[in-house]
Image (cartoon, rainbow, N blue to C red):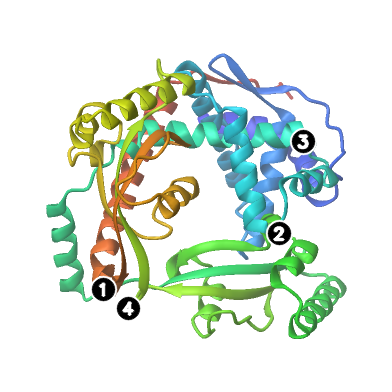
């Protein structure tokens, strides 16, 4: 019955979806109507069309085959329902994102792109997304992120014995520490794979991009100017990924590149791609700066607002300054289940292990000095750096790989169970127009 209902709703708007995906300008207006009731909210036709457009675009960028129409419609509708349920739950438990947190998120996006925040906002306006809408989209994603952190990720703990067992399994199977690649790309997408003229035009443009790169142009600037990927505004940046998290074509390309090198043109029916390998780590020795860190986390949510969390952190900070033990207060007050039992101790932290604002604090904090309260998406932290060192993490790579694999596995299982429970408990009614 569910599949029938989804298909009935989707059929009424599919033709409009295809038109929007292929040709509609950002300013196109679609007559809105309610398709699905979700608890005390709704999903409208324009939201469904936007979801279809985004799904098709992402599949093209990855060079993946677009699923059969009905399957894609069902997937998009279900994703919209799940997103709406999560936002409603965030409303109920009082998860709010302050303007300052949105500002910091925007500043971080701008920093990754190498531009100022006001330039980022102007770029958003040029593609039809005014500043208010852009900020609200950022706010929505931060709220969902914080909800999942609060309800799922923060409750996932991995014990030392579990890590030992995972390492033993890895040694038995002969698994080597995974190599991670820091990758950026430029994608020129082809709307109609059977259109030879379009393919030749994109191939010619890609060749000109290669020539500009060889002449010294910045890859990030060319990605922002030419790429059809949603990552274009980030300079084509995909971040750090293990080989199994990259498209096969990208993985084969970067495996033969040196750091800073750019691939040849990667020609597929879906588009022409250029890949840059920014960095490589894992699979061997690597000398990095590390910090021995402990923290106390005051989560935001339920009955604790951001202002209340900051006040609590300031009171705890004063108690520590007056001589009370950091570790004892962490065991009683910290909302981080994994480190709370260790007196807030996070152990040795490497670059990239924590959120940017947290890492910036520990990079600049003098040893044995208590930080001011700092805000992240997890809540408000008090942080202390106990020691610093330069360390070859090659010997630690297998243990780190085992811990991350366990966290990912347990977190994925917990997240899927949580989502199923939310979906089962929600009231969802499809409004299918007869005929």
Mark 3 or 1, nearer chain start: 3
Which of 419 and 140 lies nearest the eye of the viewer? 140
**With respect to residue 32, does 273 lie above or below?**
below
Badge 1 is on which residue?
175
Which of 325 and 378 lies nearest the eye of the viewer? 325
Residue 182 seen by the camera: yes
Label 1 Cα crowd, 10 Å radius (few <14 / some 14-19 / many 20+): few
Residue visible at 43% across and 19% down in the picture: 308
> Residue 61's x, y, as percent?
66, 61
Residue visible at 23% across and 35% down in the picture: 326
In space, the residues marked 2 and 4 are separated at their CA atoms by 32 Å
Looking at the image, is mark 2 or mark 4 nearer the viewer?
Answer: 4
Mark 2 or 3, nearer chain start: 3
> Residue 145's x, y, as percent?
49, 37
Badge 3 is on which residue?
131
> Residue 44's x, y, as percent?
70, 26
Compared across the picture, whether 332 is left or right of 429 comes to left
Badge 2 is on which residue?
232
Helix, strand or loop at label 3? It is helix
| Mark 2 vs 4: CB contact within 8 A | no
**With respect to residue 409, does 156 lie above or below?**
above
Mark 2 or 4, nearer chain start: 2
Looking at the image, is mark 2 or mark 3 nearer the viewer?
Answer: 3
Residue farthest along the front direction in this orientation? 322
> Residue 57's x, y, as percent?
69, 54
In space, the residues marked 4 and 1 are separated at their CA atoms by 17 Å
Badge 4 is on which residue?
285
Residue visible at 51% across and 33% down in the picture: 144
Helix, strand or loop at label 4? It is loop
Quarter of the image where one finds residue 247: bottom right
């Amino acid at each position: 019955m569910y599949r029938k209902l989804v298909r009935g709703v989707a059929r009424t708007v599919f033709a409009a979806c295809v038109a929007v995906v292929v040709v509609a300008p950002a300013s196109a207006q679609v007559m809105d109507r309610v398709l699905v009731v979700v608890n005390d909210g709704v999903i409208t036709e324009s939201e469904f069309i936007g979801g279809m457009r985004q799904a098709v675009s992402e599949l093209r960028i990855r060079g993946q085959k677009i699923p059969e129409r009905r399957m894609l419609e069902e997937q998009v509708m279900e994703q919209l329902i799940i997103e709406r349920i999560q936002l409603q739950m965030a409303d109920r438990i009082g998860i709010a994102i302050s303007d300052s947190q949105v500002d910091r998120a925007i500043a971080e996006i701008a920093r990754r792109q190498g531009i100022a925040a006001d330039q980022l906002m102007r770029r958003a306006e040029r593609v039809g997304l005014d500043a208010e809408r852009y900020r609200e989209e950022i706010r929505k994603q931060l709220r969902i992120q914080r909800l999942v952190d609060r309800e799922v990720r923060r409750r996932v703990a991995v014990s030392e014995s579990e890590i030992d067992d995972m390492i033993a399994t890895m040694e038995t199977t002969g698994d080597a520490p995974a190599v991670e690649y820091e990758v950026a790309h430029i994608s020129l997408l082809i709307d109609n794979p059977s259109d030879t003229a379009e393919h030749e035009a994109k191939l010619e443009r890609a060749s000109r991009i290669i020539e500009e790169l060889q002449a010294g142009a910045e890859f990030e600037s060319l990605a922002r100017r030419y790429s059809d990927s949603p990552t274009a505004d980030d300079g084509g940046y995909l971040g750090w990924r293990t080989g199994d998290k990259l498209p096969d074509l990208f993985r084969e390309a970067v495996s033969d590149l040196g750091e800073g090198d750019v691939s040849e043109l990667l020609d597929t029916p879906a588009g022409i791609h250029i890949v840059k390998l920014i960095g490589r780590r894992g699979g061997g020795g690597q000398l990095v700066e590390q910090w021995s860190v402990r923290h106390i986390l005051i989560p935001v949510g339920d009955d604790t607002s951001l202002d209340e969390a900051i006040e609590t952190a300031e009171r705890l900070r004063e108690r520590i300054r007056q001589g009370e033990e950091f570790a004892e207060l962490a065991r009683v007050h910290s909302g981080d289940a994994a480190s709370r039992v260790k007196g807030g101790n996070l152990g040795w932290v490497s670059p990239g292990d924590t959120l940017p604002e947290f890492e910036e604090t520990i990079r600049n904090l003098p040893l044995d000095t208590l930080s001011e309260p700092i805000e992240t998406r997890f809540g408000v932290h008090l942080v202390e750096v106990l020691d610093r060192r330069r360390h070859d993490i090659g010997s630690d790579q297998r243990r780190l790989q085992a811990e991350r694999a366990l966290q990912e596995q347990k977190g994925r299982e917990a997240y899927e169970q949580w989502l199923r429970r939310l979906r089962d408990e929600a009231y969802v009614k499809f409004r299918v127009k007869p005929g």
